[in-house]
Amino acid sequence: MKTYLDIPRRPDRGLSDEDMALAQALQINGRASFREIADALGVSDQTAARRWARLRSSGRLRVLGLTDPRRLGDSGWLVRVRCTPDAAASIGEALARRTDTSWVHISSGGTEINCSVRTRGPGLEDSPLLQKLPRTPQVVDVSAHCLLHVFFGRDLSPINKRGPLTAAQIEALTPRVAPEPVTDATPAVTLDDSDRLLLDLLARDGRAAVGELASATGLSPSTVRRRISELRVAGALYFDVEYHPDVLRQNFRASLWLEIDPSRLADAGAALAAHPEVAFAGAVTGTTNLYASVDVPTAQLFYRYLTESVAALPGLRHTATTPVQRTLKGPGPYLPAAA
């Protein structure tokens, strides 16, 4: 079965400089109005709206309103499922359809599935999926690594590192009210049924009009605006841009599993986050305590990256890599592609 990310590759799927500027603007503030975007980019609001409509309708971009598991009392896990090659596609598609998964990849020549799993509460016992996977036929082994800290990712993407916008344009687009600082003592955000419905709608279309959201939730437009603002300030809601693979991703993708001396983990994570090749970096549980998703043009450049940039990380003890063969699901809800 085809997925949203399996749209046939076409040579015109890359973004023009103008489209890249719009994509970076949306990555900075996914709910920015077309007037705000137009003022920052120096174009008319009609031009900004037209470019967005074209990119969205062609499947190149979509803006998602996503939630931070930590702020809702949940936990994030990076899960590696080793299985027989004949079962990888079917198991991967089943995982992609679940609402508690994201970033589902088939890796290692079709013998491994990597995915992010969200659990209700802090432990594995709160995830029926992680309890069921080890008993699934044709699954050889399952390992789960709790995501402890994000160094780069969530509302940041590679376009934040290599996008065309100037510092002044970035400043103009940055939301004026930043999320509040979160400490270990900060209580989790409490949601009611209308919040959950609102977040579900935003997860499918982060730029949905306030009127549409109000009609679907039964809330007033002013309440919708206020609640979105409150959830953003609390750090529970953030906006991300999902890109078709042909837009930003390059020809060689891999997962890095690094063992770092615990005393140097923060330094190594910060250094890794600054690498232009890194799309995501986070501290995780397990012997390999630093994970990264890497995107480079060729295997030869990946070799250079490993032997130069990765080798220079402070406290590095051991490196393991798994090449990504196919992505079945990105950060947002699973959307089957039209046949």
Image (cartoon, grey):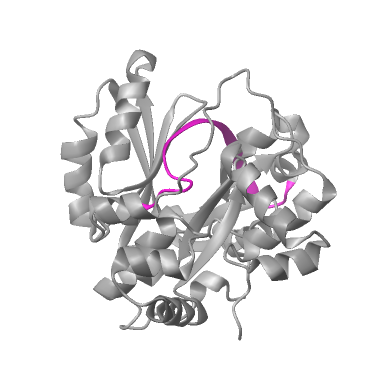
Quadrant location of the C terminus in the rendered image = bottom right
**Side of 291 relative to 12 (left or right):** right
Q: Position of residue 64 (x, y in %)?
A: 56, 60
| Residue at the image position 29 percent from the left and 56 percent from the top | 169
Q: Up-down: is 225 above or below 216?
A: above
Q: In the image, is residue 107 above or below residue 318?
A: below
Figure quadrant of residue 21: bottom left
Horizontally, residue 27 falls left or right of residue 316, namely right
Q: Quadrant of the N terminus?
A: bottom right
Quadrant housing residue 235: top right
Q: Residue at x 72, y 65 (%)?
A: 213
Residue 298 location, x and y as percent? Answer: 23, 60
**Which residue is at a point 63% across and 17% down the rendered structure image?**
185
**Magenta part mainly helix, strand or loop?**
strand
Q: Position of residue 203 (x, y in %)?
A: 64, 59
Horizontally, is 129 left or right of 231 in the view? right
Q: Which residue is most to the bottom?
A: 339
Figure check: 200 above or below 145: below
From where the camera sits, is residue 139 visible?
Answer: yes
Q: Is residue 156 magenta?
A: yes
Q: Which residues are magenta?
A: 136-157
The part of the image, by quadrant, that contains residue 140 is: top right
